[in-house]
Structures are given as structure tokens and as C-alpha cells.
Image (cartoon, rainbow, N blue to C red):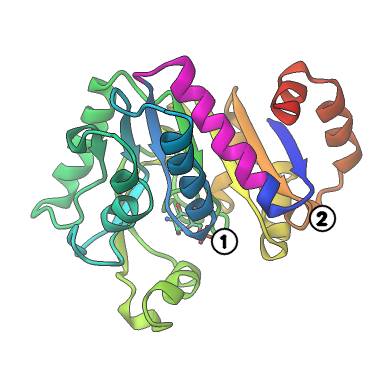
Amino acid sequence: MKIVICSDAAQTRRLAAQVLAQQVRSKPNSVLGLATGRTMEAIYAQLAEKAQNEALDFSDVTTFNLDEYIGLAANHPQSYRYYMQEHLFGLINISAENTHVPDGTAEDVKAEARSYENRIAQAGGIDLQLLGLGENGHIGFNEPLSALNSRTHVVTLAQATLRQNAGMFNNDMEQVPTRALTMGTGTILDAREALLVVTDAKKAEIIARVIEGPVSALVPGSALQLHPHCLVLLDAAAASRLTQREAIFWQMQHDPDLRALLSA
Ligand code: GLP
């Protein structure tokens, strides 16, 4: 893992948008893996701004989202398809047919999971996978104890996730769907590059387990320790529980890739 500790959340988001923009500039037909959640909103806003002001061109880009709630249609304001339309797709010049989000209303959700894996493979695999982190350590909707080599599948959401995401459902846990489709942890590990973005003190303990703890199904994000090209962007608050901060700052000062990212 390469880790960057930013001074604040704003710098974290700015660098994340920069990494995504750089990917699209260097490979205009990139296949991007995308994520949802509050952390991503400001990142997508910056990408949309770059599309407008810096002519960042998404016309050849293909995207695959990590996950979707089962039972929510594309026009449901809490569906991830709706979120993506609002926060990114509707603001950039991407072709609708190049954007993929698992279909949570599919009659046969298991068949939809298999077909999603096939579509990713047919697109040539994911070049760069953007990831957030659940407070319980989930990536996508791969909850604690799920297999670390899983492919796109149907999951039952953990109670912690229902609690964490209730904010988007009138603070009512009962309204949060209990099942979802998600890329598997194995699918995520297959992306050629991974970008994990974590901000806020409330994630300090879990990100320390992701980065410094043992690789364990109890903390699905810890599987990223096995990814050969994973960049982690943290704000100072999220990084506050890491024991290896000094080593991380040393690497930030001496790794040419990180220096280039930080000085751009
Ligand atoms: C949801 C998504 C995850 C995301 C998480 C983080 O649960 N399924 O992919 O990582 O939210 O959310 P937030 O950024 O709001 O903390």
C-alpha cells in the first residue's frame, strides 16, 4: 500500500479527484470502478468541475459501480444509480450506455450478479477502482465475515451498515433495504489499481485495522493489503490511530510517485 496523510479532508478529496482525472487523461478509454457514500460527493463535484473547466473528457470512459440496494429502482432517490446520476453522470459527458450499476430490481438478482461480472470482464477489467470504507470495515457492500475472494454477489447488509446509512433514509433504519448486490472483494482486488479514500475521526480505528491489522474477513478492507497497486488517501483525523505515521510521512517525502502527486 502507498499511503498519503493529508492535512485535512479538503486536500484528501482534491488529491482523489486529481488521481481520477489523471487516469482519464492518460487513458481516455479507461474503465473506472466507482463508489458511493458521502465521502465521494465532493470528489465527484471536483471531477465535474474539471470536466467543465479543464475539458476533462469522459466520452470514451466506461464505469462500473461497486454496489446497489436490492429493490430500489433507478428513479428511487436513495438508489445508487440515482446518486451517480445526480453527483456525476448528469454533470459530465459520459454516454449513459457506458455507465454500469448493478440492477437492484432484476427479477433474478443472482443472474444479475453473474452478468455484472461478465460485463466487467468484457470491458477488459477495471483500470482504477475508487473505494470508500464503511465504519465496520466494509468495501463495496462486502460485510465482515464475507469471503475475501468473492465475486459479484447478493449480500445481506450488516446492522452496522443499516445504522450508518439510515441518514440517507430519513434516519429510519427500517427504511434501508436489507439486501444488496455488490462486487466481491475478489472482483475489487482484480482492478489494476485501487484508490481508497477515508476521512473523519470516526473512521480512525477501522482504517488502522485495515492498514495495520491482520488480513481478515472480519475487516474486509484489510484485503487491500494484498493489492499490488493500492493508494490510500487519508485526512489527519482518519490517520490519527495509525502507529506507522512516521514511516508513512517518510515514504511521502521520498517516493517519486507520491511526491509528484503531492506537488501537482
Ligand atoms: C456505503 C457504500 C460503500 C461506502 C460507504 C461509505 O455503504 N456501499 O461503498 O464505502 O457507504 O460511506 P460514507 O462515505 O458515507 O462514510
Residue 61 found in image quarter: top left
Left or right: residue 241 versus residue 203 is: right
Left or right: residue 182 versus residue 243 is: left
Q: Position of residue 261 (x, y in %)?
A: 69, 27
Residue 253 found in image quarter: top right
Left or right: residue 31 versus residue 129 is: left
Residue 31 found in image quarter: top left
Q: Amino acid at mark 1?
A: Asn
Q: Position of residue 211 (x, y in %)?
A: 70, 42
Between 86 and 243, the one lying in front of the other is: 86
Q: Which numbered dot is residue 136?
A: 1
Q: Amino acid at mark 2?
A: Ser
Query: Residue placed at 46% from the left, 46% from the top?
Result: 44
Query: Residue placed at 62% from the left, 42% from the top?
Result: 14
**Residue 26 versus residue 263 in the image, above or below:** above
Query: Residue placed at 72% from the left, 59% from the top?
Result: 205
Between 123 and 214, the one lying in front of the other is: 123
Q: Give the alpha-carbon distance from disc 1 to disc 2, as whole Å.
A: 17 Å
Range drawn in magenta:
12-29
Dot 2 falls on a residue whose secondary structure is helix
In the rendered image, the quadrant that contains the C terminus is top right
Query: Residue placed at 60% from the left, 22% from the top?
Result: 228
**Residue 90 versus residue 93 in the image, above or below:** below
Report which residue position mark 2 lands on: 240
In the rendered image, the quadrant that contains the N terminus is top right
